[in-house]
Image: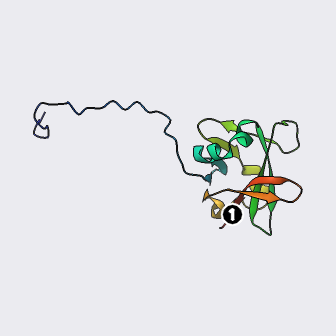
Amino acid sequence: MSTNRLSGNTWADLEEFTQKGAKSSTIRATITPKFTTILSSGLIRKMGKVFENNSHVVLHYSKANKAIVMEFTTDSNRKGALKLIKNHNCAISFNGFLKHYNLANTSVQGSYQPELINIPGMGNQWTIFLFA
């Protein structure tokens, strides 16, 4: 074993890394190749109580706006409600939704920056604009 790389025999600058679950500031929703959508931890923090207080999401699609509207809810019995799989980020299966709207192709895969949009009759909702 070579010791030529060592700076003398001192390790005084050795630091223990103690931070876990580093907080991402990236506000993103990523549609994966298997059409699962991952909400970043940065987006979840920005959503705050809207995310914390809900267990499900109902998806809506606007063809004219090329937008997916995420309506968060606690009502697990609501028609179309998808369970939020929460961890340090969040996974939502968009597979059936994307197939229904003929969006299940590689062109929708990627990262998007959701926006809080005032939707008539629904109020402020987190919205993903596709192809933006």
Residue sitting at x 44%, y 33%: 19
Q: Residue at x 66, y 36 (%)?
A: 86
Residue 17 is situated, as x and y percent measured from the top left of the image, at 37, 32
Left or right of residue 130, residue 18 in this image:
left
**Which residue is under mark 1?**
130
Give residue 84's position: percent from left, percent from top.
72, 39
Mark 1 is surrounded, within 10 Å at the Cα level, by few (under 14), some (14 to 19) or many (20 or more) other residues, namely some
Side of 101 where 113 appears, left or right? left
Figure quadrant of residue 111: bottom right
- Location of the N terminus by quadrant is top left
- For numbered disc 1, what is the local secondary structure? loop
Asked whether residue 79 is in view, the answer is yes
Whether residue 31 is visible, yes or no, is no
Instruction: Identify the colour scheme used.
Output: rainbow
> Is residue 56 or residue 18 the one in the foreground?
18
Question: Compared with residue 129, is residue 45 higher up or lower down, i.e. above or below?
Answer: above
Going by the numbered disc 1, the residue's amino acid type is: Leu
The quarter holding residue 51 reads top right
- Position of residue 45 measured from the top left corner of the image (x, y, whole percent): 62, 43
Counting labels gives 1
